[in-house]
Image (cartoon, helix red, strand yellow):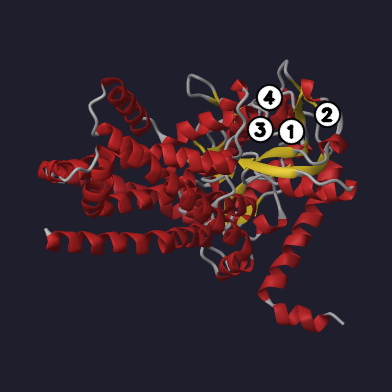
């Protein structure tokens, strides 16, 4: 009985705490405040972005960004709980509400914007190519007829396919669930080239492998929230904007030895991304309407 | 418009159906070949287990113990990434067929072995007395009776084999599960993708399961 009473008391207190929060915040932000903890999905296997060390601690640019967001929303940079996500789990975890947001080298793409709400980019990367030193491959053109290993759920394949078409060569793709799987396939000669975003690839350069000079297609990373959680989205967007303004985002990027970001390029790219997403949404929503507009 | 199961997501899935059809066909192809080799391995090892040669018995038992007690995903990973280091480079389809057949064959051998053992020993003695050799009596007398006993559990193994073919997704096998991972990963439409992928596996496996159940009923009636 005593337990039940104290439980009811805690519940009542929580509700009381919730009421003023509701008054000023949107429901999604209020839910985070009521919980007192920000639930963030991050990568555990990408050095410098989201990496879990042997002690179980997460570290990297995206971890720092999550701490900053917790400070903005809850006033405490440590009021954040990390969950390791993979390309396959990050979407469903947002939809079920187990996570408030995902900051996990999540490349913004027009068709993805239709599935989740993305913040403006906090980092932009290019696709790189890693090959074995003894393979004799020196440039992208040498990959004609070869197999490139990419990560499932990465945007690499589409971008490289387009580049190959432009260059007039044909390449094959094999997709793998994790980066270590791709590295294993490269070492065993299953694939001729390991390709993901360059900053990620840097973590896999060793004395048997070499990065090719070619880079492709910008990969802007955004924070993703569940579709419709616009309250959280605007907090994230405001935070990223102010961090860009005061230079703290640039400092964070250089702290993790990542290449400096050209924000003018990012903004230009962002505009076109959201425009494409809008066109895509209109095209699928009202096919008749677009048909009549076209001459 | 929003949510993992939105109309837009279903439309997107159905507009790319041909991509999934290619994976579905490859799953069928690998499963069918895998099943044929599973039966061959099961039959050979199962019959050898009925013999008395100690070394052969030990080899058969060793094979079965190893393949029954290690995960298929590790076996497949070894064929894909370790064998090339020893100079053996097999294609993913060969690895798929071989991996599934060696794994399921270890269970099939058990089934064949116990099905043969379930045929009364008098049958073998009777066949011998009629002048049949060991192999002849196996083929004409014992196996036809053993098939009736072993077919229902063997059919269950066939269903397992088909479902296990999804493991090939980790080595870029190009089969149904790989297609589902690849497609949903790129556009994040996972709702319809995995529901329909499950339905496609069900379409292959359910008829086989129902067949097994019918055979089981019939064999119970005949005993």
> Between disc 3 and disc 2, whose residue precedes?
2
| Image vertical order of residue A167 relative to residue A113, above or below | above
Q: Are marks 2 and 1 in contact (CB under 8 Å)?
A: yes
The chain that hosts pointer 2 is A
Q: Residues within 10 Å of mark 1 (few under 14, many from 20)?
A: many
Pick whichever of labels 2 and 4 is earlier in the sequence.
2
> 10 Å neighbourhood of mark 2: few (<14), some, or many (≥20)?
some
Question: Residue A87 occupies which quadrant of the picture?
Answer: top right
Given residues A74 and B140, the one toward you in this image is: B140
Q: CA distance from mark 2 to mark 4?
A: 17 Å
- Mark nearer the viewer, 2 or 4: 2
Q: Tell me the CA gap for discs 3 and 1.
A: 9 Å
Decide if residue A268 is on the left or right side of residue A93.
right
Asked which secondary structure carries label 4, the reply is helix
Horizontal and vertical percent position of residue A266:
81, 45
Residue matched to label 1: A193
Q: Residues within 10 Å of mark 4 (few under 14, many from 20)?
A: some
Residue that badge 4 annotates: A204
Count how many numbered circles sit on residues in the image.
Answer: 4
| Side of B33 relative to A250 (left or right) | left
Q: Is residue B203 left or right of residue B55?
A: right
Residue drawn 31% across the image and 39% down it:
B109
Say which residue label 3 marks: A190
Q: Is residue A51 visible?
A: no
Callouts 3 and 1 in the same chain: yes
- Chain ID at mark 4: A
Look at mark 2 in the image and give the residue it sits on. Answer: A137
Say if labels 2 and 4 share a chain: yes
Depicted B81 relative to depicted B203: above or below: above
Q: Position of residue B10 (x, y in %)?
A: 56, 68
Marks 1/4 same chain? yes
How far, Cα to Cα, is label 2 from label 1?
A: 9 Å
């Amino acid at each position: 009985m005593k337990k039940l009473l104290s439980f009811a008391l805690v519940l009542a207190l929580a509700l009381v705490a919730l009421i003023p929060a509701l008054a000023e915040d949107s429901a999604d932000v209020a839910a985070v405040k009521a919980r007192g903890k920000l639930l963030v999905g991050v990568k555990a296997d990408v050095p410098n972005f989201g990496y879990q060390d042997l002690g179980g601690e997460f570290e990297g640019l995206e971890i720092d960004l999550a701490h900053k967001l917790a400070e903005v929303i809850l006033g405490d940079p440590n009021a954040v709980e990390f969950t390791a996500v993979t390309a396959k789990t990050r979407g469903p975890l947002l939809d079920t509400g187990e996570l408030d947001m995902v900051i996990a080298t999540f490349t913004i793409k027009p068709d993805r914007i239709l599935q989740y709400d993305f913040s403006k980019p906090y980092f932009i990367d290019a696709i790189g190519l890693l090959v074995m030193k003894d393979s004799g491959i020196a440039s992208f053109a040498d990959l004609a007829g070869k197999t490139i290993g990419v990560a499932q759920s990465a945007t690499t394949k589409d971008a490289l396919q387009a580049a190959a078409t432009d260059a007039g060569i044909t390449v094959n793709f094999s997709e793998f669930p994790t980066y270590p799987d791709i590295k294993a396939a490269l070492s065993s000669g299953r694939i001729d080239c390991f390709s993901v975003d360059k900053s990620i690839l840097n973590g896999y350069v060793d004395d048997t492998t070499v990065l090719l000079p070619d880079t492709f297609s910008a990969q802007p990373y955004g924070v993703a929230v569940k579709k419709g959680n616009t309250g959280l989205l605007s907090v994230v967007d405001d935070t990223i904007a102010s961090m860009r303004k005061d230079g703290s985002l640039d400092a964070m990027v250089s702290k993790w030895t990542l290449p400096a970001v050209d924000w003018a390029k990012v903004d230009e790219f962002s505009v076109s991304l959201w425009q494409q997403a809008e066109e895509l949404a209109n095209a699928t929503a009202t096919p008749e309407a677009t048909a009549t507009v076209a001459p | 418009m929003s949510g993992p199961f939105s109309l837009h997501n279903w439309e997107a899935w159905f507009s790319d159906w041909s991509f999934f059809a290619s994976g579905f066909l490859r799953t069928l192809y690998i499963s069918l070949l895998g099943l044929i080799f599973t039966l061959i391995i099961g039959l050979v090892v199962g019959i050898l287990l009925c013999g008395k040669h100690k070394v052969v018995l030990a080899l058969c038992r060793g094979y079965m113990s190893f393949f029954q007690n290690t995960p298929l995903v590790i076996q497949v990973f070894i064929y894909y990434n370790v064998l090339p280091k020893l100079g053996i480079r097999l294609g993913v389809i060969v690895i798929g067929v071989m991996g599934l057949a060696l794994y399921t064959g270890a269970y099939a051998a058990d089934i064949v072995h116990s099905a043969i053992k379930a045929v009364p020993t008098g049958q073998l003695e009777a066949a011998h007395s009629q002048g049949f050799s060991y192999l002849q009596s196996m083929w004409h007398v014992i196996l036809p009776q053993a098939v009736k006993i072993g077919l229902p559990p063997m059919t269950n193994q066939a269903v397992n084999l088909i479902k296990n073919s999804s493991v090939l997704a980790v080595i870029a096998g190009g089969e149904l599960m790989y297609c589902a991972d690849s497609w949903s990963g790129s556009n994040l439409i996972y709702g319809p993708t995995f529901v329909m992928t499950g339905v496609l596996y069900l379409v292959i496996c359910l008829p086989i399961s129902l067949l097994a159940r019918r055979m089981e009923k019939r064999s119970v009636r005949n005993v």
